[in-house]
C-alpha cells in the first residue's frame, strides 16, 4: 500500500493568501476609480494624463479610465461678486462706483475656460473686466449725468462687460450699480447748486404770486370803478325824487301819531307841551 506524503508549508500558504488579498484590494480600488460622480450644479472637466479632453461631463455618475483620467468638478451655478472701482467722468470728476455682478460659466465649454485660465477666473478675468467696463462707460458721462442717467449707464456697462466675459465662455446674468461716490468738493458744489435752484424757484414763485395778486387788485378796482360809473349813469332827478318819497313814506309808517315834544329851527328848542 502506497502512502503519499502531503508537504504542507505554512509560509507558502500565507504568501498565497496575502497575494490574493492584495489582488482583491486592487480590484476594489480599480472598481471605485472607474466611476466618478459630478455634483449637482457642476460640470466635469476630464483630464487624461494631464491633457484637457474635449468632452465635458454633466452632473451625475460617469465612467472613467482608472489612473489615467481625472475629473475636475467646476461650479456652473450663478455666482455673485461685488466690486468698487475708481474712475474719471467726462468732466474729469473722480467717481467710485460700486457694482454687484451676477454671472455663470457656460456648462458646455468649461473645459476651454479651465484650459485657458484655470479655476481662478474671478480674480484673473471677472474683476479686471468689471473695472475696464466701468472706466470705459463712466468716461462717456459727466458726474451729474451718472446720477441722473443711472439706468442708461447700467445698460451700457452690462453690454461692455457681457462682451468681455463671453470671450472666456462666461455668461453675464445681471449687474446692479449700487452706489456712485464723488469727492467732497463735488458733493458741496452739488449741494450749493441745489440750494441756489431752490432759492431761484422760490423767487420765481413769489414773483408769480405778486403778479397774480396785482392783477387781482387791478381787476377788483376796475370792477368797482365800473360799478360806480354805472351807478352814476343811473342817478337822475326823477330817481332822487323817488328816493325822497320812499323815505317820507317809510317815516310815515314808523310814526306813532304823536307830535314831538321838542322841535328845532332857527330859534332855540322850545318845549311844545309847555
Image (tube, helix red, strand yellow):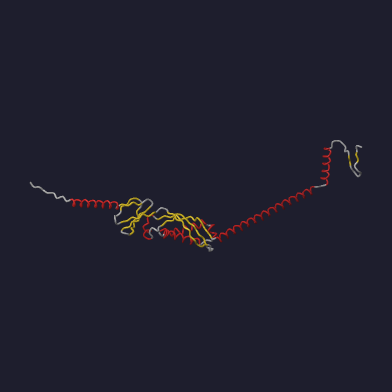
Q: Where is residue 193 in the image (x, y as percent from the top left)?
A: 59, 59
Q: Residue furthest left?
A: 1
Q: Which of 202 and 14 is in front in this view?
A: 14
Q: Quadrant of the C terminus?
A: top right
Q: Residue furthest bottom?
A: 92
In the picture provided, is 120 more to the left or to the right than 25? Answer: right
Considering only vertical position in the picture, is 266 above or below 187? above
Q: Position of residue 263 (x, y in %)?
A: 89, 41
Q: Which residue lies furthest to the front in this view?
A: 10
Q: Where is residue 223 in the image (x, y as percent from the top left)?
A: 73, 50
Q: Nearer the viewer, residue 9 or 78?
A: 9
Considering only vertical position in the picture, is 255 above or below 220? above
Q: Nearer the viewer, residue 227 or 60?
A: 60
Q: Nearer the viewer, residue 1 or 75?
A: 1
Q: Position of residue 159 (x, y in %)?
A: 46, 58
Considering only vertical position in the picture, is 198 above or below 272? below
In the picture provided, is 168 more to the left or to the right than 69? Answer: right
How many numbered tags mark residues here?
A: 0
Amino acid at each position: 500500500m502506497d502512502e503519499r506524503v502531503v508537504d504542507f508549508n505554512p509560509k507558502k500558504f500565507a504568501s498565497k493568501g496575502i497575494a490574493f488579498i492584495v489582488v482583491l484590494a486592487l480590484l476594489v480600488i480599480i472598481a471605485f476609480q472607474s466611476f466618478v460622480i459630478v455634483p449637482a450644479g457642476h460640470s466635469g472637466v476630464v483630464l487624461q494624463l494631464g491633457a484637457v479632453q474635449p468632452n465635458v461631463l454633466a452632473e451625475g455618475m460617469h465612467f472613467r479610465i482608472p489612473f489615467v483620467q481625472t475629473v475636475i468638478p467646476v461650479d456652473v451655478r450663478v455666482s455673485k461678486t461685488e466690486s468698487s472701482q475708481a474712475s474719471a467722468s467726462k468732466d474729469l470728476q473722480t467717481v467710485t462706483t460700486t457694482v454687484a455682478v451676477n454671472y455663470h460659466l457656460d456648462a458646455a465649454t468649461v473645459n476651454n475656460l479651465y484650459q485657458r485660465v484655470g479655476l481662478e477666473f474671478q480674480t484673473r478675468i471677472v474683476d479686471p473686466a468689471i473695472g475696464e467696463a466701468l472706466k470705459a462707460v463712466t468716461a462717456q458721462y459727466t458726474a451729474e449725468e451718472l446720477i441722473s442717467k443711472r439706468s442708461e449707464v447700467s445698460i451700457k456697462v452690462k453690454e461692455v462687460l457681457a462682451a468681455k466675459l463671453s470671450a472666456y465662455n462666461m455668461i453675464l446674468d445681471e449687474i446692479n450699480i449700487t452706489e456712485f461716490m464723488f469727492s467732497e468738493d463735488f458733493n458741496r458744489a452739488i449741494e450749493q447748486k441745489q440750494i441756489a435752484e431752490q432759492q431761484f424757484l422760490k423767487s420765481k414763485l413769489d414773483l408769480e404770486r405778486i403778479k397774480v395778486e396785482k392783477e387781482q387788485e387791478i381787476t377788483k378796482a376796475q370792477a368797482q370803478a365800473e360799478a360806480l360809473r354805472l351807478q352814476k349813469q343811473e342817478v337822475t332827478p326823477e330817481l332822487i325824487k323817488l328816493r325822497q318819497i320812499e323815505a317820507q313814506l317809510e317815516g310815515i309808517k314808523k310814526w306813532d301819531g304823536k307830535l314831538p315834544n321838542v322841535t328845532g329851527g332857527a330859534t332855540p328848542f322850545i318845549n311844545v307841551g309847555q
